[in-house]
Image (cartoon, helix red, strand yellow):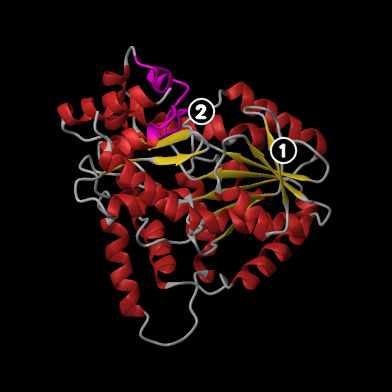
Amino acid sequence: MEQKFGNQVYEKMRQLQEQGKDVNQIAKILFDQDPQGHNYGIGIILDGKGQPAVTSSTLLEYASAELEQSKAGTYMNSGKVLKDVQQAVLQWQRIPEHYWEYFTLALPSDAGTGAVKTAVEIALQLDPHLNALGVEELGWPAYKAIAKASRLQVQEFATGKPITGDTVLPIYQAGPMNTTGLVHPRDVIQHRAQSAAKTGTYVILDRAYPGFEYARRLATSSYDEVMRMSYESQIQPFLEEGVPCALAIGPTKAFVTFSLRPCGLLLLFCPDSSRQSAWTTVINTTMRARGSAFEHAITRAFVNALLHDRARLEEEHRQALTRLSEAETMWRTFVGGTPLEYLYADNYAGLFRNPKARENAEIAIYNEHIYPVFANQRCRQNVTGIPTDKELAQTHVRVFAEQCY
């Protein structure tokens, strides 16, 4: 097959690599330069036509009102309603009320990434002996950047194994893995929680995709049931074992607010009442140092939406999960009998899959005007990139199945 176009795109990819662009940036740049391009390389919900899903109308409405309220040029924040916001977040995450007294909420800037970074900074103040960030193999690549910025080494652990070590700070993706879509069973997560409980280890749980592991259940289950299942599988074991932990929650994917980038939601769980005062001091110091003690207008708007219109936000979350479920169903329909079939078994879910790529897969896939993320001989695909047009979707799946495994 003539692959002149694919070769041209591949050479452009190499040029961007030499300029220091990361793989996610490269996928977006290449897609934007191709009018016929099909987007599989972006980390947001796509609408079935390769375009970003519509931004939360709820947050847009509250953002407009908040901008009107921001005429006075002064510092503003959500301090006076923070306890109410905390309750709203705990309710959204379906965390039982008997745990609420052990939680403290912080609202870091920069969405979920900011929440993870703040959780790391808090950990370093609580334990200055930490010198490494423990991550799972094939975990979110940004963890390495966060570690470097925090002057921590990175220590990788085998998939599914507990992250241990006296000077290691564990971070787990509490949901489908950002890169691969793998969903760990309850016994793996229980083992992690028990391991951390034995040593009193502070653990970071990255909740960028709450409920995404059970999106396909929406056909037979309610949104509330999906969120409860997500809590029970991903969070409950750590709370039951009394593990001090940070839930770094990203609202951008759940509520389709990526363009607005509202605050991250950081829930700190301190089961030892005698340490809560010290934790509060560390949290406040960290937030002040980050500049998050005073908030952007979008953060204040998001807070007001959570307080006054959580049901509308949750409905938008349900719609995002429904789009993911539809896309996963289409993939399942077409990958049967191909090398990619395993990626749509029940132990995989969420926004991404990351199969291995064959030699020269980049050229062949680019040649079809398809733009995933290529890194380390793997091809990361955004599941919602698949078109709603069945004939085109089948063609795309065939191309991926020929080049990936």
Pointer 2: what residue? Answer: 183
- Residue most toward the bottom? 73
Look at the image and say whether residue 200 sits in the magenta stretch: no
Q: Residue at x 19, y 46 (%)?
A: 36
Residue 370 makes an appearance in the image: no
Residue 220 makes an appearance in the image: yes
The kind of residue tagged 1 is Gly
Is disc 2 surrounded by few (<14), some (14 to 19) or many (20+) residues within 10 Å?
Answer: many
Mark 2 → mark 1, Cα distance in angstroms: 23 Å
Pick the front one: 216 or 10: 10
Query: Main structural element of the magenta stretch: helix, strand or loop?
Result: loop
Image quadrant in which the N terminus is located: top left
Pick the front one: 68 or 170: 170
The kind of residue tagged 2 is Val
Question: What's the magenta region?
Answer: 338-361
Lower position in the chain sequence, tag 2 or tag 1:
2
Please provide percent x and percent y for residue 133: 70, 47
For residue 363, side relative to residue 78 (left or right) = left
Pointer 1: what residue? Answer: 242
Image quadrant in which the C terminus is located: top left
Question: Residue 33: which quarter of the image?
Answer: bottom left
Label 2: which secondary element:
loop
* Marks 2 & 1, CB-CB < 8 Å contact: no
Mark number displayed over residue 403: none
Please provide percent x and percent y for residue 389: 16, 32
For residue 240, side relative to residue 173 (left or right) = right
Pick the front one: 146 or 299: 146
Please provide percent x and percent y for residue 227: 44, 36
- Residue most toward the top? 337
Pick the front one: 316 or 385: 385
